[in-house]
Amino acid sequence: MRSTLVSTTLLTAALLGAALPAGAQGFIEIGGFGAAAKFDPSLPYGTLNAGGARLTLASGSGLATFMLEGDASFYKYALGGSSGDLQMLPVHVRYAWAPTFGPLSTILGVGGVRNQYTSKNAITPNMRDLGYSGLVGFRLAAGNYMALRVDGVLDYITHPIAGTALRNTNRSVQAGLSFPIWMGHAPAKAAPAPIGPVVAAAPAPAATPVAPPADADGDGVPDTRDQCAATPAGATVDNAGCQVYRDSDNDGVIDGKDLCGTTPANVAVDGHGCGLAPDADNDGVPDARDRCPATPVGVAVNSVGCAVPVAPVAEADGDKDGVPDSRDKCLTSPAGSPVDSVGCPVALFKPNERTVTLRGVNFEPLKDDLLPGSMAILDEVARQLIAAPTVRVEVGGHTDSHGTYTHNLRLSVQRAEAVRAYLIMRGVDGTRLNARGYGPDKPVASNATVSGRAMNRRVELKRID
């Protein structure tokens, strides 16, 4: 019986799909469901579980969507003893309104139900009863290939089988999947006919195809101005095609190495982006030894956090290097040369020199972790940069040619960022420092020898003020 029902459902769906006109809106779908039913107390069945099949023909769209559908389910009830089993086949046919909002449809349906009872028990004859049926449910479409149906069904039997009440009520819940076998769409609207005489337009000249500029790494920057031609896929780049490393909390430590990614603004951090000792008045002296914990912002302080008296009258500055002659130990500094706190040229850059190599600043092999011996060198660099507040520099990372180009380029950027982060941690204003990686592109010695490769692995400071 069940195989005959499925075959009939499929044949009916195929015939309906072939008969519908082109351009019709709606769909035809078949589906299966599981059901749990609670029959009228006058019947001896109690709660039964079943499975069934459904055929749905829908027409229209939006609020004007209507359905004509039928379903059948199969219940089996053991009568006990040797009397055999009672089998019931409810068949519903209904008409429903199904207002549709995107993929979701709400279904309200009414129709009729016919219950067919069969039994191997000679005492219990085959019977049927008839009644009305109502349905409330929803349909959730998953694209154009499948839909989820959940429905509640109420059957009101007006002519029940002999031996029961004058009428009874059966309730069931159905849940299952449906699969469209035909989908209709609204035909495209034709363009309005022109008014007046139609003048044929002259054919447009064929456009000469223009090839897009070459972009080998696909970062959106053409190769002609891409200074980092092997940027990894999906990376954020600047106008020169080089990867931009994010620093979400602006503490000078890139997010990839920041262990404390939400450091408050203006808090001094270590190399891992975590705050140093608390300093409530931000005067550079930790609260633990600050004898004047409420020093105003911008006031110079001594080693215990108290304000240093400021001379009321400006002192003479003969070489105009910003250091008064009273404490200027180099009274004839060249014009425009950066000087330290005692007025002497910063040893970091010699006269007319724009680039200096930080010899002795080394890293763990294939990593961007500074070796302990590098800290003393960078401490002195930080001291000199703090003493010359007008100097702005680019921290450039360089590698040898050993390994892949992409790895070397990424490693050079990470090492440059590590040096920049350390200098910021030591008090250098981060706005004065830019980090950039050049990979193996700018060697200073041959990569064919061990000593040459060692010289090529370096960090340089270049003045950009």
Image: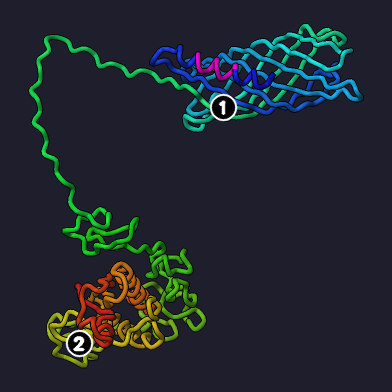
x then y, percent, for residue 65: 50, 17
x then y, percent, for residue 272: 45, 73
x then y, percent, for residue 17: 47, 16
| Residue, far bottom | 329
Amino acid type, callout 2: Pro
- The quadrant the C terminus occupies is bottom left
Q: Which mark is residue 345?
A: 2
Q: Is residue 109 left or right of residue 255?
A: right
Residue at x 62% of width, y 13% of height: 94
Amino acid type, callout 1: Ser
Helix, strand or loop under label 1: strand
Q: Quadrant of residue 228?
A: bottom left
Residue 161 or residue 230, whichever sits in front: 161
Residue at x 22% of width, y 61% of height: 240
Residue at x 58% of width, y 20% of height: 107
Q: Is residue 262 magenta?
A: no
Is 64 situated above or below 381? above
Tag 1 residue: 178
Helix, strand or loop under label 2: loop
Q: Which residues are magenta?
A: 8-15
Point out the tag, 1 or 2, that comes first from the N-terminus.
Answer: 1
